[in-house]
Amino acid sequence: MLKRVLESVLVIGLAVIVSSIACTAKPDIETETAVVTKVINDNIAWFKDKDFERLFNTYSKGPDLFMYQLDTAATIRGFDDLLKYAEGWKNPDVRYGGHVFHELNVHLAESGETAWYEGLLEDCASIKDRPVRCFTTRITGVLEKRDSRWVIVQQHFSLPAEKIAEDWAARTAHPPTPAVEAR
């Protein structure tokens, strides 16, 4: 009887040790970073063939998705907003002209469940018969690993103000809002 109890304790002890080792195993940073980088690239490259499934698979499908686009009217709160916004990209007159990331930096949390990135995106397109034109935007984002897949949950595109126009400050300056005045 004592032998069986000792064997059971040994088996349970080994199971606890093995499972705790498996739970604390560090993620393969290089592999995970490569997968995250592919998701970030797919998030832009989808436009070459207007592969909307490829685009949508890069994002969280829930209400937690948040994006600042280049214009304030295009702030996206939730996947349903993205679906509505994406309708404009179906315009056949707007065509992919290429893209390249400059200075793309991908970071992975120790847990291996969260990643974030920043970089510059040269994003090019043509409209109707006009020549290809490019914007170089700053881009940042946060991804989470959900059901073994990396998805973007937050993204922000912006143009450096000094690149927009020399008189940007004069054109965009405004009086303080009541919230600022209250401080």
Image (cartoon, rainbow, N blue to C red):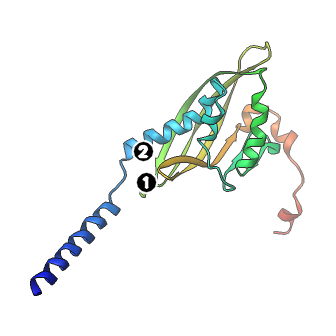
Which element is circle 1 on? loop
For the residues bearing labels 2 and 1, Cβ distance under 8 angstroms: yes
- Of the two numbered discs 2 and 1 on the same chain, state the one appearing first in sequence: 2
In the image, farthest residue toward the front: 1
Which element is circle 2 on? helix
Relative to 57, is 22 on the left or the right?
left
Query: Which residue is drawn at the image coordinates 38% and 47% (left, top)?
Result: 29
Query: Which residue is drawn at the image coordinates 82% and 41% (left, top)?
Result: 169
* Residue 3 location (% of width, % of height): 9, 82
Residue receiving disc 2: 32
Q: Is residue 120 above or below residue 125?
A: below
- Location of the C terminus by quadrant is bottom right
* Residue 158 location (% of width, % of height): 70, 40
The span from disc 2 to disc 1 (Cα, nearest Å) is 8 Å
* Residue 32 location (% of width, % of height): 42, 45
- Location of the N terminus by quadrant is bottom left
Kind of residue sitting beneath label 2:
Glu
Foreground residue, 54 or 180?
A: 54
Displayed quadrant of residue 21: bottom left
The disc label shown at residue 112, or none: 1
Foreground residue, 116 or 49?
A: 49
Crowdedness near tag 2: few (<14), some (14–19) or many (≥20) residues, C-alpha within 10 Å: some
In the image, farthest residue toward the left: 3
How many labels were placed on the picture? 2
Q: Is residue 19 above or below residue 168?
A: below
Crowdedness near tag 1: few (<14), some (14–19) or many (≥20) residues, C-alpha within 10 Å: some
Relative to 71, is 13 on the left or the right?
left
Foreground residue, 145 or 166?
A: 145
Displayed quadrant of residue 72: top right
Kind of residue sitting beneath label 1:
Gly
The disc label shown at residue 150, or none: none
